[in-house]
Image (cartoon, grey):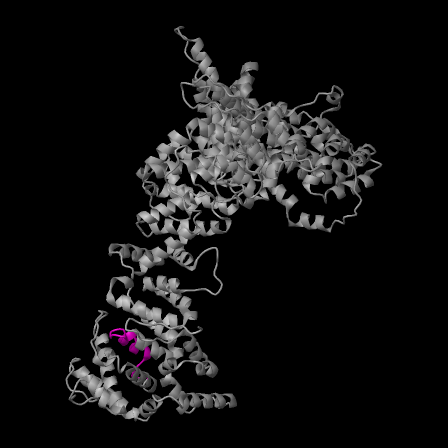
Amino acid sequence: SVWYYCFGFAGLQFVSSYAFEAMQKVDVVRLAALSDPELRLLLPCLVRMALCAPADQSESWAQDKKLILRLLSGVEAVNSIVALLSVDFHALEQDARKEQQLRHKAGGSNGESILVSQLQHGLTLEFEHSDPLRRLRLTLSELLAIMNKVADSNGEFFLKSSELFESPVYLEEVADVLCILQAELPSLLPIVDVAEALLHVRNGDWFLCLLVANVPDSFNEVCRGLIKNGERQDEESVGGRRRTEALRQLCQMNPSQALNIRAMVVEECHLPGLGVALTLDYKPDTPDEAVSPLVSYVSGLLLGTNSKVRTWFSMFIRNGQQRKRESSSVLWQMRRQLLLELVAILPRSRSTRLPNDGGMEDEAASGYSGLREEHVVKASALLRLYCALVGIAGLRPTDEEAEQLLQLMTSRPPATPAGVRFVSLSFCKLLAFPTLVSTPEQEQLMVIWLSWMIKEEEYFESAAGVSASFGEMLLLVAMYFHSNQLSSIIELVCSTLGMKIAIKASSLSKMKTIFTQEIFTEQVVTSHAVRVAVTNNLSANITGFLPIHCIYQLLRSRSFTKHKVSIKDWIYHQLCETTTPIHTQLIPLIDAYINSILTPASKANPEATNQPITEQEILSVFQSSQGEGSRGGRQRFSITAQLLILYYILSYEENLLASTKQLALMQKKPKSYSAALMDQIPIKFLVTQAQGLQQELGGLHSALLRLLATNYPHLCLVEDWVCEEEVTGTLPLLRRMMLPSNTCRYSQSQLHQAFQKLPSSSPRLIRILEHLTLLSPGDLIPYAEALTASMALLLEPAVPRRILQTLNKLWMGLNTVMPRRLWVMTVNALQPSAKLLRQQRYTQNDLMVDPLIVLRCDHRVFRCPPVMDIVLHMLNGYLLGSKAHLQGHLKETADFDRQSQTISNLGVPGQPDTPEVTREELKNALLAAQDSAAVQILLEVCLPTSEETNRGPTQGKQKLESLLSDLREVQCLICCLLHQMFIADPNIAKLVHFQGYPQALLPLTVAGIPSIHICLDFIPELLAQPQLEKQIFAIQLLSYLCTQYALPKSLSVARLAISVMGTLLTVLTRAKRFCFFMPTLPCLVAFCQAFPPLYDDVAALLVQVGQVCASDVATKVRDVDPFIARTFFLLLL
């Protein structure tokens, strides 16, 4: 039948969903199809609809109204309802309000009543014998009394015994009166308040359904009101259960709104049993074969993000278990339904009692069968739900539930991605709730299932086509058990299940014993891990537990070295099989691998270490990038693999130097990677590539920058970063975008020929070079050799300046991607012609050991500013690189040399060890001498050559000015570099000025080097030197500084200098006095010009100098002629 009948405990007929839908839509045809009993329940609304003046004046409604009148014409009860509607409701409402006021004054006591006079008989007999008006008054008085009592109850539930609402004979008439009263007096009787009052009488849910069915538009309003006023836990009280039952009947009457009412329940966090009951009652039109509505609903409550909802529903589960098992309890209905769903998807019935042979090969004999593919997703959802119920809500499984759960968990799904997920969930559930395994038979069942997992893992991974299988999780858990990292196992379980569960570490003791002694011994884990295939195209997009997690944990626990299992090849191949975005476990894996190479597993066995990756394997990764990022051909390895190998090498070398002391004590010296290998790795090109992939590389780019700044400071020059912005910025990018694709492309041979034919080929060479400026630095790499090899040709006088400047720009662009190789080629190309004839080729190591080789170039470079700019850039880089090279060499050899010295001195008294500070001091002295020599050479370059000094005007004014312009530009470039060097290390400035340099350069250095003012700090110390030349240089330097920086500090140092000059005047011999004062007396003029208050001191010094000179003259004259001397003496008197 299309009609849905619902009967209460007393056999009352409720409104069917078919009838309610007809009322909602005012479908007269469907109403006419209702049976007489069903139609009887809807008469109050239909009669009012037929008698009252309608708002709809359309013809269609007029026809429908006729059909309604025809429908009502044969029903006898219509007459009594018409009589009820004939009453004066306005007067009735006034009386009702007066009675309410009277009751309010009387404190709610049932004394006098305005609506109902003194009753002669019982309420039921009075109702039977009364006319319509009195019936209305009787019902209204009773209803108002209940509503008042509800308002005064403060939320405490009570059940009002009312003869009127309990008599089965008059229920329909009372329902008619109730519906008419509410419809005619809505302000006096709000439907939500009436609904709340009906919960406190017997048959209240039946009255409530009739009331709502006759006012169908009020359905949502009534339901929301009842839910808002409801209890947080409805199963705890009679009132809660009655409210839940009433709402459940309402939703059965209007099933289309059941899910909306359930959403209200969750929103308000009231009546959790109602939400479950509505889910149990819900019958979807198209049932989902994967997951049932009950599983979806409860899983959403417990595993959702709303902690308030999760706590509320968990309390419902906990409280429900405290009561005795009742079939009427919603909780037990839910558990029974879940159990039925679980049993329905189980494979064929099997017992935990295993056959005697226990063989795994014959599955049919051992009672095992596979889980059907269409049931795998539903099984996974059920497992997660039971995990949430037990772990979050505190559900205590019954023996039956535990037995069936274990049966499901140890079933064998098909080899699909969903099957892999199911096995992982089952395994984690076993770890999370080991109490499910309580008998020896169940324990043996679990061991056989785990053994099956190990056996089938490779097949599942290949057949399912997934990279993250359950085999890695098994290995990982086994490793955690062996290393006693129980907290990591708990974290792994919670992560896989997708929920936070409180798991006690002590509960894992049984599983630990099974894993470590029966299934996975440590040696089995280690040997099995190496055979696991690497993950192809490993990236952060691949989630789950992968082989890399297992290898990382084994590396940390030193299992490979302990059992002498080589892991190098696996790690190398995994690093090569990577792509972006980078997996978060890769960098920790490399760090753990490096630590296992350098640090033995135990002091007793220093050889127990892993083997490093070989140089040949490293070179094969960069074979497509040999030219510092060669772009020829497709790269075999991804940029991610190359960056990871680069990080490995740099981090390995840094850790090797940091561990030198510990390695020396153990008499162990791991091999360092050769300089030749490092020269072939395009470090700067790779770091530049990484800069554009920072989002995909995570923390790898910053880690590489840190390692570069420590070990390769010459690749981290500030000027390079600034230049890189100019080369890779927006403007160059736009210029390259505007470059037509069909633009003439020039080959390296064409570029070489244009260089060779200079100066006649200048226009063609300019076109080629200008075209090259439009290319990216990476595209310039093939032209690097042709550009550098011909640089010496550009030193000829007739080469246009534009060619030189364009070459400088191209060189700086190449410097951003291949600096080290470019520097070596440039240094070799700029050697003097005599060296070129001897074919002396410098290597990267030569230049790191002796950076001054850069300045042993063709002397014409010193008067070619664009090329000189390149030379200075290389010099600055090699000076920095030399510092790092010497520091690394010192660390690498110091501890081993000291260890050897200690061993050689054993038993030889009186031979103390060489103090370590001596080696450090020697290194610092070498670096200082190196820097100061570079500065002195550069200062010497700033001096005009003899040719420039002696060049006369007859040779042409234009040529002379050009030469002077080049000299001035070179001087500016050198001053800029010296300024940076003095800022980086002020001790260099002090050392250079203690050494001294030509006085002719003082105007240039003071004016051209802004940081030279730091010399004011050590000029007093320079004045105190015993060498006369240093004192003279100090006073000359001070005179220029006072003019350039007229500061209070300069004034005080100038006073000191004048005082020193006065002191020296009295102690120097005649010859030294002449040598000292002739160059320093002109400096007094600069002191006075800068600081006029010094006039008096300078004048006094000059008078003193004059007196000393006069006495010297007198003494000299006296020695020649005593008479003249006596005359001169008298004149003085």
Vertical order, 625 against 75 (above or below): above
Residue 1053 seen? no
Foreground: 153 or 342? Answer: 342
Whole-percent x, y for residue 835 in the image: 73, 21
Residue 861 seen? yes
- The answer to whether 844 appears left or right of 416 in the picture is right
- The answer to whether 392 appears left or right of 1119 in the picture is left
Q: In which quarter of the image is the N terminus?
A: bottom left
Vertical order, 712 against 766 (above or below): above
Q: Quadrant of residue 325?
A: bottom left
Tell me, yes or no, whether the highlighted magenta stretch contains residue 195. yes
Q: Quadrant of residue 88?
A: bottom left
Q: Which residue lies furthest to the right in this view?
A: 760
- Write the start and end of the magenta stretch as one range: 186-204
Whole-percent x, y for residue 30 in the image: 46, 80
Whole-percent x, y for residue 1060 in the image: 47, 28
Tell me, yes or no, whether the highlighted magenta stretch contains residue 1. no
Whole-percent x, y for residue 580 in the image: 57, 43
How many numbered tags mark residues here?
A: 0
Vertical order, 112 against 912 (above or below): below
